[in-house]
Image (tube, rainbow, N blue to C red):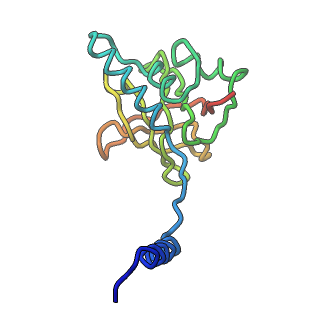
């Protein structure tokens, strides 16, 4: 049996329709926007190429789009009037760590994924001096399960000290 062009077209369309019906729909999952991540990493590379330090604040600002300036310890109070804030993590939100004796300037990181009620992943800079850490695990160790106290995966599989957290700054005012 010889296929003519119209028959080929009908057969091809039938095959495509059958294939389309058997494919699972793609779920859209929230995450860090790839262009933001690319921009943030380009900025890090530019800083390093000039011999400059990589800090958590500009990295978090570039990655999240939260336009707050100043040391990390000032982000939570500044955000109160400028951005939606929450005590619960959301992907894309800035996690604002409180200032402590060991971290007097505070720290900020961006939530890149949630892995259940008490575990998430963050992307941040300068946790390890002058480095960017992507997909670093954080666990909620607060008694009230409210993300007010966390432990950060300082090395693969090893969670460090307990750190207080002010809350989460959501992008988009």
Most foreground residue, 106 or 31: 31
- The correct choice, above or below, for 23 with respect to 113 in the image is below
Task: Name the residue at the bottom extreme.
Answer: 1
Q: Position of residue 21 (x, y in %)?
A: 53, 74
Q: Position of residue 37 (x, y in %)?
A: 43, 32
Drawn side of residue 153 relative to residue 171, left or right:
left
Res. 87 image quadrant? top right
- The correct choice, above or below, for 1 with respect to 104 in the image is below
Q: Position of residue 4 (x, y in %)?
A: 40, 78
Question: Which residue is depicted at the point 48% across and 24% down?
Answer: 62
Q: How many marks?
A: 0
Most foreground residue, 121 or 25: 25
Res. 65 image quadrant? top right
- The correct choice, above or below, for 36 with respect to 44 in the image is below
Drawn side of residue 66 relative to residue 104, left or right:
right
Q: Position of residue 45 (x, y in %)?
A: 31, 21
- The correct choice, above or below, for 146 with respect to 124 in the image is below
Question: Which residue is depicted at the point 40% across and 18% down?
Answer: 55
**Which corner quadrant holds the C terminus?**
top right
């Amino acid at each position: 049996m010889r296929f003519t062009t119209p028959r080929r077209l009908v057969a091809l369309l039938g095959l495509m329709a059958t294939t389309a019906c058997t494919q699972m729909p793609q779920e859209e999952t929230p995450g860090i926007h790839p262009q933001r991540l690319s921009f943030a990493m380009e900025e890090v590379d530019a800083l390093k190429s000039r011999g400059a330090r990589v800090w958590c604040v500009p990295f978090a600002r570039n990655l999240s789009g939260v336009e707050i300036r100043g040391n990390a310890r000032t982000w939570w109070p500044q955000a109160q009037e400028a951005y939606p804030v929450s005590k619960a993590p959301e992907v894309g939100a800035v996690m604002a760590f409180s200032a402590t004796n060991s971290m007097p300037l505070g720290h900020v990181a961006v939530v890149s994924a949630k892995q259940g009620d008490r575990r998430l992943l963050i992307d941040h800079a300068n946790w390890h001096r002058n480095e960017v850490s992507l997909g670093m695990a954080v666990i909620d160790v607060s008694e009230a399960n409210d993300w007010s106290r966390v432990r950060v995966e300082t090395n693969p599989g090893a969670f460090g000290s307990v750190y207080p957290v002010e809350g989460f700054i959501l992008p988009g005012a």
